[in-house]
Amino acid sequence: MPKIRIEKHEVEAARVLLELLEKLQAEVRDGLLWSHWMGICGNIAVEVRHPDIKFILGIYFAAWPGCAQDRDFPVEGSHRGYRAQLNKWDPATLHGRRRRELLDFCVAELKASLEAHSEVSA
């Protein structure tokens, strides 16, 4: 059972978000990131066209067990901490590993939420 319930009016945005996050996941895996100095939001911002996407993403950030009490900066916990990390995705650093975990969490939970919504709607 997913931790987060997708409302009917959020389904379209959630599907777009999942597509963007899966694309980012592949770019991280393949070393093809648009920007190593930006986090999840920055790397998908170029393609974000739906107003609910950032709102939905913030809900998943806050639900991540490792969230540092700030859903705008869930990995580092503050704007200052975020700015201090130059390569935000470096797997050799704690923050790089945590950001990758957050991305994987968001993809898995979003998939589960969309699947649960499809089952309820059917």
Image (cartoon, grey):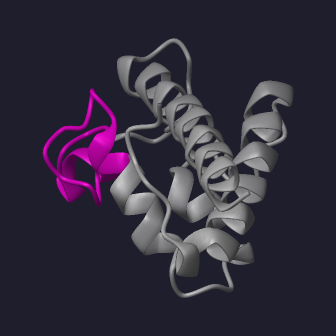
Residue 15 is a magenta residue: no
Q: In the figure, is residue 67 to the left or right of 61?
A: left
Residue 1 vs 60, above or below: the answer is above
Query: Looking at the picture, how far across and down is residue 121, in whole percent?
Result: 66, 61
Nearer to us in this view, 83 or 105:
105
* Residue at figure coordinates x 73%, y 67% from the top left: 16
Magenta range is 61-84
Query: Looking at the picture, how far across and down is residue 83, in whole percent?
Result: 32, 53
Query: Looking at the picture, how far across and down is residue 63, in whole percent?
Result: 30, 42
Residue 31 vs 50, above or below: the answer is above
Q: In the figure, is residue 76 to the left or right of 27?
A: left
Q: In the figure, is residue 101 to the left or right of 32?
A: left
Q: Residue furthest top?
A: 92
Q: In the figure, is residue 97 to the left or right of 68?
A: right
Residue 65 is a magenta residue: yes
Is residue 92 visible to the viewer in this orientation of the structure? Answer: yes
* Residue at figure coordinates x 33%, y 35% from the top left: 64
* Residue at figure coordinates x 18%, y 44% from the top left: 77
Is residue 84 visible to the viewer in this orientation of the structure? Answer: no
Instruction: Characterize the magenta stretch by its predominant secondary structure.
Output: loop
Quadrant holding the C terminus = bottom right
User: Quadrant of residue 76 in the image?
Assistant: top left
* Residue at figure coordinates x 54%, y 52% from the top left: 40
Residue 48 vs 99, above or below: the answer is below
The total of numbered circles placed on residues is 0
Q: Residue furthest left?
A: 69
Query: Looking at the picture, how far across and down is residue 46, in whole percent?
Result: 70, 75
